[in-house]
Amino acid sequence: ETSPFDSVFISMWYVMVTFTTVGYGDMIPTTLSGRLVASGVMMISLVLFAVPITIISSIFTEQHTLREREIVDRDLFMKRKLLREVLTIEGGGMNRIISSAATKTKREENLIPPFYPETGNSFSNVFHLFEDMESSTLSSVVQGFITIMIVISTISLTVESLPKYRYPNHGSNQGDSAPQFYVIEVICSTTFSIEIAARAISVGFVEAARMRILGYTSVGNNSSFCGKLLYWLRSPGTLIDLISVLPFFLQLSKLQTPSLAFIRILRLLRVTRIFRLVKGLSGTVILTNAIYSSLDSLFSLGFLFAVWIVVCASVIYVQEKGSYNETQGYYERETFFGERERTPFQSIPDTFWWMIVTITTVGYGDTYPTSTEGRVLGGLIVFLSIVLLAVPISIVA
């Protein structure tokens, strides 16, 4: 059949439908690798989607409690408000003096970022220029430019997947695309390569204390040039940066005879550039630290999930596999209308897919029980799975 995953844009529809657990069933992965990836997407998306909802609910509860306290203690609240107004009126002149003195102190202590990083030596300044956007005004400009390049590269990668920009409309081989996208790739990859090279050359000259401030907490005071460089290379952020430019150099080395599989690998690796947009955000750091702190509980629950999936899949398989058709060579079951059809539950591993789609409440509709016993068991599994699924979400939140 014609694949519904015609481009990255079209695949975004599938991701949104899966991410929100809607599961229309118009786009369903059929390959084993596609289903494995989709299973991971469903599990991760549920956590990512549910955590902010839980946080918002907690904030709403706090605000509601605060409002109730304000209503109960209305008299005390009004007295405090009146007292604050009196203090503001009487102390207005003093507040202006303190504010002026604080502004002057900030300027004297150089708390306002300079135009160029001032960290002690030229190499350290270069490293902070690309690594710490708060170290200077120029650093913010450079980081803004890098962000724009990442956005352009991501948009280019997405648009390039549209059929009208691919073979056979452009190029002579499968995997070829419009030449404009290669130009954009060269410009973006060159920019990223220069940035990474500048940081690699200068990181060894940065003081250990400054590196720890930037998040490289394991760097010791006696670390050598090579030690700092190796630690920087091993950091997750640097690995993302290196992987994001790797396709460009691989493509240069295989420019004459690129195979279709090779081109697919390149496109997959280029997707990692989008992680550069979020690796420094405070929300990303908080969520990553929360998940890391919850790993013990999540691993235990992951094992429980695996047991639950195997047990439930085995029960549904036994109930829904039907009878074996010797002529056709597969199991058949009876439909709602009394007809015979090939059952989608041909084995327990095949039933894993139904179980994962069900436990994540996505429900594509490609596999489902038809017997009365199977529906009763499926209903129990759905309700118990929701309770089981809510536990890891609450832990991370």
Image: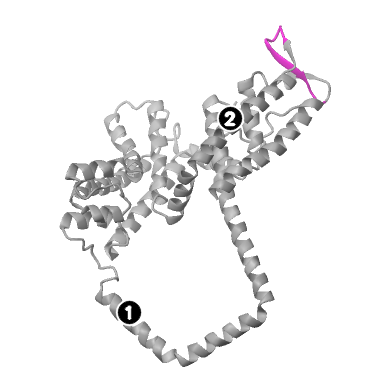
Q: Which residue, given by chain and number where applicable, does mark 2 sit on?
A: 306
330 in the magenta segment: yes
Number of on-image labels: 2
Q: CA distance from mark 2 to mark 1?
A: 58 Å
Residue occupying image coordinates x 30% and y 29%? 254
Label at residue 103: 1
Instruction: Give residue 88's position: percent from left, percent from top.
Output: 49, 88
From the viewer's perspective, is residue 174 above or below residue 19? above
Which quarter of the rendering shows the N terminus?
top right
Instruction: Give residue 82's position: percent from left, percent from top.
Output: 58, 87
Label at residue 89: none
Instruction: Give residue 326's position: percent from left, percent from top.
Output: 71, 7
154 relative position to 367: left or right: left
Q: Amino acid at mark 1?
A: Thr
Q: Residue furthest top?
A: 326
Q: Say which of 82 and 214 sits in front.
A: 82
24 in the magenta segment: no
